Image (spheres, helix red, strand yellow):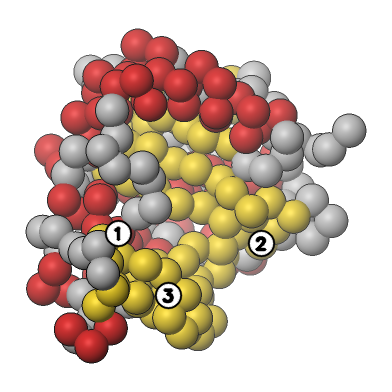
Amino acid sequence: MAASFPETAISTDRLLLRPLAEDDAPGLATMMADDLVAAWTDLPQPFTEEYATELARTLAPAHRTAGRGIVFAVTEHLTQRLVGLVELRNTDWRLRSTEISYVTAVWARGEGYAPEAVLGVAQWLFEDRGFLRLELRTAAGNTAAQQVAQKVGGISEGVLRSAWIVREGAAEAALEAPAGRRAGGESRSDLILWSLLPEDLETPELQHAGWHGEGRYVLRD
């Protein structure tokens, strides 16, 4: 049987990362109906309530039990409002390595929720699950995702050339030149590869920013 992550929740200062529930479907559909989400992610579009329900009921649990990764709904402690989605994917259990992706709702952007969620997951992976490497891959034009990678202490390791497909939409101005455009409103994009290792969380910059120290996350199995 393949190794897999436990069904769990992670609590940070402001956020609770927990398994998806079927009643998250309306909020998920609203969050994903955003041009930037459509442009920079590979999530299905349109992202309907029916698909969100299937994701919570079947797809996310199967993703976890098969050992491929885990999906977390990110909610505010104060309001219980859904502020984002975090997914671990492409998990290699022999190398103790996995890749993280993240989406933040339009109304919650600029509040530091994405780096807080990513760091909570990173600390859980390294300290509780014994992982040794976390990867982040950001499209070359997705400066917001790159800022998250930088804020959590990620190290840029290089560029994966023409390794992603970006959908056109509100982010069209940030896409490649027209020569790279494909039929169907898509264009190819480079990906920037970032990595985060356990020792990267010990940097003075993260400690000064309040990301490190006792009580930074609470595990709820």
| Coordinates of residue 177 in the picture (x, y in percent) | 19, 86
Q: Residues within 10 Å of mark 1 (few under 14, many from 20)?
A: many
Residue at the disc numbered 2? 133
Relative to 125, 92 lies left or right: right
Question: How busy is the neighbourhood of tag 2: few (under 14 within 10 Å), some, or many (20 plus)?
Answer: some
Q: CA distance from mark 2 to mark 3?
A: 18 Å
Q: Which mark is residue 40?
A: 1
Q: Which residue is mark 3?
A: 191
C-alpha distance separating marks 3 and 1: 11 Å
The amino acid marked with disc number 3 is Leu
Mark 1 vs 2: CB contact within 8 A = no
Residue positioned 35% across, 76% down in the render: 189
Q: Amino acid at mark 1?
A: Trp
Residue ranking furthest to the right: 1
- Residue 60 falls in which quadrant of the image? top right
Q: Residue at x 70, y 58 (%)?
A: 97
Q: Position of residue 174 (x, y in %)?
A: 17, 74
Q: Residue at x 64, y 53 (%)?
A: 90
Amino acid type, residue under disc 2 in the picture: Arg
Q: Percent from the top left, x then y, of residue 118?
A: 45, 49
